[in-house]
Amino acid sequence: MASEKGLNELLKWSIENSAAPDPSAPESTAPRSTLSADALAAIMGGPSDAELMQAAVEHITSSDPEITLESKLTAFDNLEQLVESLDNANLLSKLGLWTPLLELLAHEEDQLRLMAAWCVGTAVQNNAPSQERLVALGGVEKLVAMALGDRLPVEKRAGAGEETTTTTTTEEEGAAAAGQEESKDVRRKAVYALSSAVRNYQPALDVAAKELRKRGEDVQEGIDATDMDAVNGLINGLKQKALIA
């Protein structure tokens, strides 16, 4: 397995070299990163998708001030493409990446919240095991709140493992979040993720419908998750709300 240092350098090199060169840039422009022996070994050894997913999440969640928002967004884009594969989407649970991914739904940067919702929607699409994990970790309730325009409070992890992790929010943080509205673009992406989560998976639809009714939405009882007309009616209503927000 490639070393963590090599993977991080590989990710940095990939991000920097994914952008087209600027022909107007002066010749004195600082050179891009070069690959160390560890990073080259990672390439020659072919880092696994699991290693790339872990490196991407570590990059996105890093507090290193030298890591730019643009760099994190590129890493998020790479992650979203990786979880288009059902096998990779199911790796999120095995690698313990669902918890940090769901925490990013509450990130202060709206672009990162949008990408988090996008990744969630891609990972659970036509994927019952991933839909199950989303339900188990309270992700459906989060998506409902976002779809209706609520900013999620920042959550602080209170455990080491994904299966036992709980999150807490202070009264001050909760009050601050309650006074903020989610952006229109993030709301629309949350609706997309919710749509992917509830289709053909009854437990997720039941949770979503219950949460929507609790929040005052007129949602009928007993919607069948395999009835696409009924599901489309529910999702289209949320889309319209997000568009006119």
Image: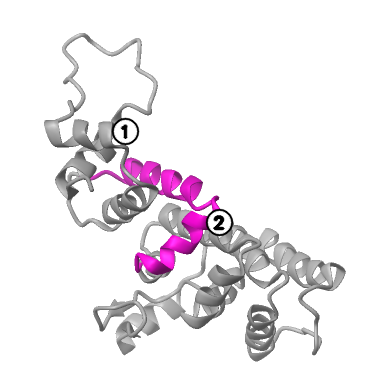
In front of the other: label 2 or label 1?
2
Residue 231 lies in quadrant:
bottom right
Prevailing secondary structure of the magenta residues: helix
Q: Which residues are magenta?
A: 67-96
Q: Which mark is residue 237?
A: none
Residue 104 falls left or right of residue 1: right
* The C terminus: image quadrant: bottom right
Q: Badge 2: few (under 14), some or many (20 or more) residues near its Cα, within 10 Å?
A: some
Q: Residue at x 68, y 66 (%)?
A: 195
Q: How far is mark 2 from mark 1, CA to CA?
A: 24 Å
Q: Residue at x 69, y 59 (%)?
A: 243
For label 1, the residue is 14
Query: Total of numbered circles in the picture?
Result: 2
Residue 77 falls left or right of residue 129: left
For label 2, the residue is 86
Residue 232 located within the stretch drawn in magenta: no
Q: Nearer the viewer, residue 50 or 11?
A: 50
Residue 69 percent across, percent down from the top left: 32, 46
Tell me, yes or no, if residue 149 can be seen here: no
Q: Nearer the viewer, residue 58 or 208?
A: 58
Residue 47 percent across, percent down from the top left: 31, 42
